[in-house]
Amino acid sequence: MVRHLQPRKGSVAFSPRKRVAKETPRIKSWPQSDEPKLLGLAGYKVGMTHTLVTDTDKNSPTSGMDVFTPVTVLEVPPVVVMGIRAYEKTSRGMKVITEVLADNLDKELSRKISLPKEYDQSEAIAKIKGVLDNTADIKVLVHTNPKVTSVPKKKPDIFECGIGGATPEDKLNTALELLGNEVSASEIFNEGEYVDAIATTKGKGFQGVVKRWGIRIQYGKAARSSKARHVGSIGPWTPRRTMWTVAQAGQMGYHKRTEFNKRILKIASKDEVDQINPDGGFVKYGLVKNDYVLVKGSLPGPSKRLVILRQPIRPNNKSEDVPQINYVSTKSKQGV
């Protein structure tokens, strides 16, 4: 008799499923680009709404028609380039050689890090130029400005961002031009472009195997026990241990996740906030006050969560034409 086993329930690709150490995601991989600009941007998730967008796909059955499209709103006030880091390649990976900080750092950064009282920026720049021969990569430190948004905090979020350039020297020259300056979303991305979204997902606490792994609830005569929401068998006699691949209860959510190739439908300035703010504001967020970005579909995390948008690391071959948005819903979301 041939026994047909069901496929396993739930993916083991993200194991161990534990809470992230820091809510601000750390991005280790950046795409290669010769364009002299930042390769990423951070914003705060506002919520979702819906739009009507003209379908420009010639092979689509709805080509030329207005299609209902759910979008996520990100508030993206300009980020500030606060530092430059030089990396060298060692047998144990990339290591920081030296770094340069801006001399006009925001006072709110003292809530996050210890600011230097006496700092010679010219000496630090001379040092980083002196080690350029040993430098394998240049990255920049960027901080957000949450106090101008509806997020109830003043402490900026700091993250490391890649920068475009053919050589480390080109990257350093671009970084020195941006050091201490604000960079807006329109200087980094274009409408219709595809990006990667990295964020920490919603935390759901300790959950059982049915919700966490999606196993079936056992039927009435199975094992003749009072338990239904459990795994019928957690493994054979040999090997005499429970494998890590067995579905078990534990932490669910609050994990770092990356969603690839999310399309930017619109990049708008703070003068256009009336076109997006619904009556009564967004639920659990409030009103958008700054530049904002509309991204097609959903993004990880709850409202007010930091989301980092990155140039696509595995770009697709889809068209990046500027989308035509004919309607954006500003109906109140309070009763939804």
Image (spheres, rainbow, N blue to C red):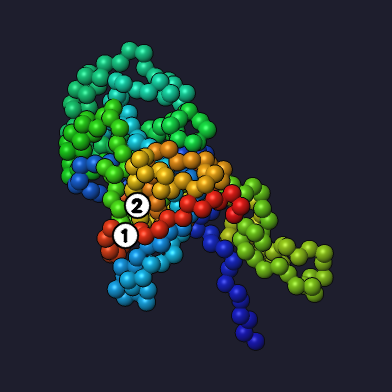
Left or right of residue 140, residue 236 in this image: right
**Camera-side residue of 296 and 227:** 296
Q: Relative to 24, is 51 above or below?
A: below
Q: Amino acid at mark 1?
A: Pro
Q: Position of residue 48 (x, y in %)?
A: 49, 52
Whether residues under marks 1 and 2 lie with C-beta atoms below 8 angstroms apart, the answer is: yes
Badge 2 density bin: few <14, some 14–19, many ≥20, Cα 10 Å = many
Q: Amino acid at mark 2?
A: Lys
* Mark 1 lies on residue: 323
Q: Position of residue 130 (x, y in %)?
A: 18, 26
Residue located at (35% from left, 40% from top): 271
Mark 1 secondary-structure assignment: loop
Q: Which mark is residue 99?
A: none
**Camera-side residue of 174 and 67:** 67
Q: Relative to 134, is 273 above or below?
A: below
Badge 1 density bin: few <14, some 14–19, many ≥20, Cα 10 Å = some
Residue located at (32% from left, 60% from top): 324
Q: Position of residue 264 (x, y in %)?
A: 35, 54
Residue located at (41% from left, 67% from top): 67
Which residue is farthest top? Answer: 118
Left or right of residue 247, residue 178 in this image: left
Is residue 311 at least partly visible in the picture?
yes
Mark 2 secondary-structure assignment: strand
**Camera-side residue of 130 and 90:** 130
